[in-house]
Image: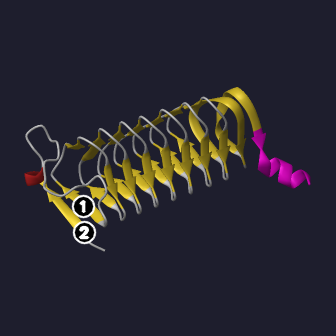
Amino acid sequence: METLKLTIKDFGADRYYNGPVDVTDFHGNIEIDAGAGWCRFRSSLKATGYIESNGALYADGDIKSGGDIDSGDYINSVGYIVSGGDIVSGGDIVSGGYIYSGGYIYSLGCIDSHDFINSGGYIHSGSYIKLIGPLRAAGDIESGGYIHSGDYIESGGDINSRSDINSGGLVTCKNLLNGKVASGKLVETRVLDQAC
């Protein structure tokens, strides 16, 4: 698979991409080594392989990858963020749409979505998790702050939150290890499994 390597010369003084290759539907991997700071895209950033950046990623459209999305800083998209693999950020993950990952989602900062969040693995946030739609993870959900979902919260593992958990529906997990359900109804499935 081809790997497109972008450097500081592919970005203008405003930090927006101005390179010759169309990155709105790239068939291969994209590696960005443009130093610290934002790497901006005036439209979507899409690759059939992985997307990797040592700086922050910002797209006026969507960010989509068939593999992992890995950023040493923020990941910010006006549209959705979709990864066939893991999503890893050294800062916040912010999406104007939904966030979908075939693997885990790991952020040292907050995770903020204007729609749903769905992870095929665990979800870890060093700060809060906030979204309008449902929050689903096949594994554990861990938040360094609060968890606020406008819909239900469903974890295939445990939930560990350093602050309140607010849900517009059920909060389902194996065990609530830490945190308090301030709104919504808690259903711990490990307790149900032991009762059967």
Residue 178: percent from left, percent from top: 63, 39
Q: Say if 58 sits above or below 25 in the image.
A: above
Residue visible at 31% across and 74% down in the picture: 1
Which circle marks residue 31 in the picture? 1
In the shown orientation, is residue 83 left or right of residue 167? left
Cα distance between the residues tagged 1 and 2: 7 Å
Q: Which residues are magenta?
A: 187-196
* SS state under label 1: strand
Residue visible at 24% across and 54% down in the picture: 54
Residue visible at 75% across and 35% down in the picture: 186
Q: Amino acid at mark 1?
A: Glu
Which circle marks residue 3 in the picture? 2
Label pair 1/2, CB-CB below 8 angstroms: yes
> Who is closer to the viewer here, 3 or 142?
3
Residue 176: percent from left, percent from top: 69, 42
Q: Say if 173 sits above or below 53 in the image.
A: above
